[in-house]
Image (cartoon, helix red, strand yellow):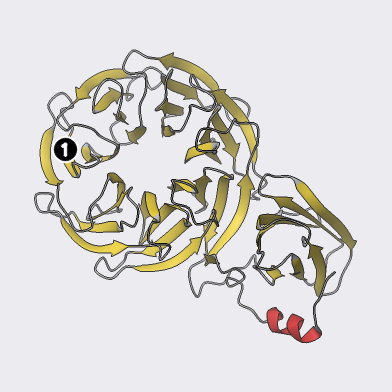
Amino acid sequence: MMRITLLFLLIFLGLAPNSWSQDSQNVRLMAQWFSDEPETNARDSRYNDCWGFVINGEEYGVIGSTSGTHIIHLPLNNAIKEVAFIPGDAQGEIVIHRDYATHNGYLYAVCDQQPSKLQVIDIRHLPDSASLVLSTDEFFTTAHNIYTDEYTGKLYCSGTSSAAMTVLDASVTPESPTLLNQFNLVEYVHDAYARRDTVFLHAAFEGMWVFDFANAEDPQLLGNLEEYPDDGYNHSGWLNDDGSVYVFADETQGKRLKVCDVSDLTDIQVTSFLFSGGASHTIAHNVIVEGDYAYVSYYFDGLQIFDISDINEPQRVAWYDTYDIDEQDYRGAWGVHKGLPSGRILISDRYTGLYVFRHIPEGVPDINQEIVMFPNPGNGDAIVQIRRSSWLRMQHRAYDSRGRLIDAGEWLSGADTFWFPVDLSDQSAGAYYIEIIIDEGTPEVLRYMLNRD
């Protein structure tokens, strides 16, 4: 039964828009995509990395699963949907890793489990179609990651079955890349970031190395960072817009991200650290830098956003936890993408699929916040409040984290401030998603955390 007093209601009417939940701050969930069709793997998860791109003026996301590659249309009204699926060469419970890059109308997909190949997908005709145009083991079978230098058209395929890193040329024939180098100057490359032939190599326990690949057959060492404070398994990183700051993550429990001054590559300096503030064993996985912010996908801690405008004293400014269970394994958010023209952020969660977020910086009004839900977290008895001067029809649908519909309702016309109950008291603890549609407009999605004390 719904239990709420007038005083309780009035208290919550005054809450700030970005303070609904203990596990989110200054981040707005715009949409989520999930399917239970992919098989779960040995780690009881379905999904892995994500990426984003623009084709024909429309934004898209891609997320890998145990089955293959899912391409998701991301219209500006956030009514997202899967528009194409490309089966992987390796499929099923054996699949843990997939990774993606794009160049000149083509999507490149690799997988780190056998039997795999380099897949080249023609995405130029989306949303109508996406087609597999090449699946080849000419250069390697498995690869851990792939990254495109958009300025040169070179593809850097990390941790391949053939070399520490395989370098391909997609500048002339993006549908059919050619081999430039089977690179082995370090023992293993886990991931790479490239811009204008300057390539940062994340070499696991060998640290970070930077090479000039202008002559891909004979790359030149520019600098390295073999030992540094709080070091671990050197995993991945990203360069800021002007090329002076690099942020990287060590995929090791409890290790912080490093903010580095790379203005002199012969003398790379760690200036500060980033940390989610989560459990001591939490793990930062991937990072993207854009403007003054670093966007991080954290196992256990979801999306974490840091202001790095002062590289000596960065600040954690926003977050959204996609995985609310404290674990000792590699669970939760895997991939992050930032760079779509709309400003939206993508996160892939290994268990709950693709998330679309928007960062609302502190002090910036969120003009879309007409809907609030409280108390959140709660015990299943919740109130949704609508603030809108006039409307004719409002619908709500509640889904669990598996995408199953568990509650629905509809109202016709209402006052300037209207509220209704959502009863989830008979559900188990966890995350639930409440979709609100007003007058057939853009769906709004609220995330509700049900706790059991």
Give the labeled residue for mark 1.
211
Q: Quadrant of residue 184?
A: top left
Residue 126 vertical placement versus 321 (above, below)? above
Residue found at x 58% / y 30%: 126
Q: Looking at the image, which residue sits at the far right?
A: 412
Residue 436 vertical placement versus 8 (above, below)? above
413 and 41: which one is in front? 41
Label 1 neighbour load within 10 Å: few <14, some 14-19, many 20+ = many
Residue 295 vertical placement versus 94 (above, below)? below
Q: Quadrant of residue 282?
A: bottom left
5 and 153: which one is in front? 5
Residue 140 x %, y %: 33, 18
- Quarter holding the C terminus is bottom right
Residue found at x 54% / y 56%: 325
Residue found at x 48% / y 21%: 90
The type of residue carrying mark 1 is Phe
- Quarter holding the N terminus is bottom right
Instruction: Confirm whether residue 444 shows in the render.
Output: no
Residue 161 x %, y %: 30, 21
Instruction: Confirm whether residue 94 shows in the render.
Output: yes
Residue 308 x %, y %: 32, 64
Residue 77 vertical placement versus 122 (above, below)? below
